[in-house]
Image: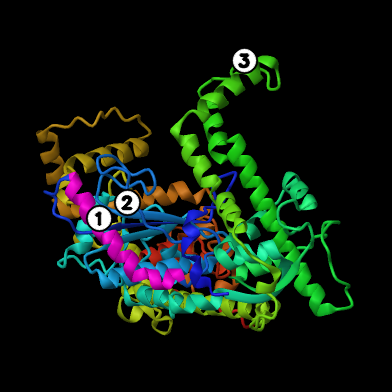
Amino acid sequence: MDPSSASTSDAFPPLRRQTPEDTLFYAIYPSLPPSLTASAALSSLSSLHLSINSLLSPYISSYLFHHDPFLLSLPSSLSSPCPLCLSPPLPHLHGKTHFADSISDEWFIVSLLFLASRTFPDLVIRVWDSDGEFLLIEAAFSLPRWVNPDTSTNRVFIHKGELHIIPMEVFPSTPTLQEAIKAVRNDKIDTRASESVQMAINRRIEGYPEKAKENLQRVRVRVPVKVAQVLKMEPCLIALAVEAFYDRDIDMMKHAAKMEKFLKGKDGEVDMVRVSVTMTRAMYGQLVQQSFQAPRCYPMPSREDRTAYTESELGMKIACGFEMLYQERLRAGEEGKGATWEAFKKSLEESGCFDGLLPGSKEYKRVLEESLAYYKSTSLFSRTREITSAPVRRIDEILSLPYSVEEFEGADLPPNDDDSWLYNGEDELNSAILEREKEMQAYESKKKEKNVKQEGDAAGGSSSKTNDFNLGDIAASMQEFVRKVSSFEGAEVIDDSLFLRNSEDVQLDTDQFFKAMESVLNGHDDGEESTSDMDFDESEGSDFDEEHGGDEEMGDMFMESYSDALNKELSSTTIKKSFVRPDQQNDLSEGPSNAGDVDGDDKDLSPVDVDFNLMQSFLDSFSSQQGLPGPASNLLGLMGVKVPPPNTDK
């Protein structure tokens, strides 16, 4: 059967009890003069709607959608936000498609939107699904690092057959939809996504929309003549029948057990015929992979005839699906208790209509019946019943026309399509995984090269190479770090030219400082308490300067006195043993604990080699990290010193 006759599939939307998750949304924004009136804008949208449908209809009419078809429509109003696509009051066309288990439907529609954008260059198109910006997910390894679900709102569009991503430089914060569309159309603003992103999307839709035909599966089945007649006239109804079979519940199984509508012919006999049915691969898999016991009233051939049994088993599942579809739609249309009623009832519960009422009680039933009666009087119920009952009316109309078994006998049926893809999917899956792994490896490699380059630039010149590592760099860098001016917020270890504090912000009165320190030192020498409150006058300062011969000599004397006092304080502690002195550097095998064993010896007060002890402490700390992150490597990295890893070959 030719699926091209499935053009009326949009008249039979599936019946669902809850909002589907696997739904694709799309919105098309044309370039219209802002001065147009609402009526003129609607007229332009209608013309565009007709043009796009004319362009895409050859592809859509020959394609069998798994659930919902691609369907564009005009917004209900241009003066209020759109409830379907959440667009502000802008002239646009929109639609949504529940693709369920058929990912091919989603990418087929994406290819149609790219085709429309190439044909009509002024269009700006949005497309997203229940997971969000799935186009970005497809090109995840090629995206800029700033792109994530939180920053991509109103930034991803299709324009002139290419993907556009509005960069952060244009709008640091989330732009409005109007601002974003204007930026995409502005030739002076580069919103076109990178070439790697374009390639990732193009690989996914390569060959579409023509490639969509590969998603169809043609198979021979044995079905009751009524089912054959319906499929002959409306092949698109196979989608609803498979959905009813796949999503069946206990109540729907009761309809299949009786087969009141489709099993018996006009004369009461069960007439079975062989036909060729076209469905999507997803539908075929849903039917074949499910075990289902045939109803007792349904005739099945012997298992010995393998071909006949296989055709009859698949046909039985299709026939049961049609029975479930018909009876469920008929009941929902008569009772009005479909998905819309459930949503209406939930809104009543949230508003407090049933507060204080016990479910199942007499009062609860009374309020529920009154609510249902009111719901049935609304236009919403009328529209819902019209949509729900559409397949029932169409099936009744088809079966009311003349038909016979002879019409299907002796027909030259095409052979079954190869279904090895259903059982050899592991190879295809492994191939897809390997392709993703290659993309990930390329991404990680590129990221690593970038990090290495950044580290090299930060270290600068030869210091970034471990072969040129110099221990003197540690001491020099630490001395430079100590000399930097810092504030209460902490020390600065980055570029002086950008962040070094102005030394004039902190002023130190050196005369007052030295007077205070001498007072403290003299007080300790004389064994007297210091009575200084840091309040010195100018005359005291001049006498001190004359006695000690000026600022330079005074500074030397102070440092000598300060060092002697500090050494005396430390001589009674064990901290002196933790430092290495110049005369001990040649004999480190005894360890730092042997430094200065003779108490009172002048060696105890000999100067400490600060640079040597600093490097020894740094290297000991770095070695103890065993190649892992730690304080020593972090601090050295901040100072731009690259230390080679410790040598573990012993």
Label 2: state its secondary structure.
loop
Amino acid type at mark 3: Gly
* Disc nearest the viewer among 3 and 2: 2
Residue in view at x 35 percent, y 46 percent: 86
Compared to residue 84, the image places residue 621 above or below, namely below
User: Between disc 3 and disc 1, whose residue precedes?
Assistant: 1
Q: Residue under label 3, please give it.
A: 356
x, y percentage for residue 153? 35, 53
Amino acid type at mark 1: Leu
* Disc nearest the viewer among 3 and 1: 1
User: Between disc 1 and disc 2, whose residue precedes?
Assistant: 1
Range drawn in magenta: 38-61
Amino acid type at mark 2: Leu
Judging depth in this view, the residue of 380 and 210 nearest the camera is 380
Marks 3 and 2, how far apart at CA? 43 Å
Which numbered marker is on residue 45? 1
Please say whether residue 48 is one of the residues in the magenta stretch: yes
x, y percentage for residue 192? 27, 69
Compared to residue 569, the image places residue 533 above or below, namely above
Marks 1 and 2, how far apart at CA? 7 Å
Residue in view at x 66 percent, y 82 percent: 418
Judging depth in this view, the residue of 375 and 268 nearest the camera is 268
Q: Are marks 3 and 2 in contact (CB under 8 Å)?
A: no
Q: Residue under label 2, please give it.
A: 74
The crowd level at tag 3 (other Cα within 10 Å; few <14, some 14-19, many 20+) is few
From where the camera sits, is residue 10 visible?
yes
Label 1: state its secondary structure.
helix
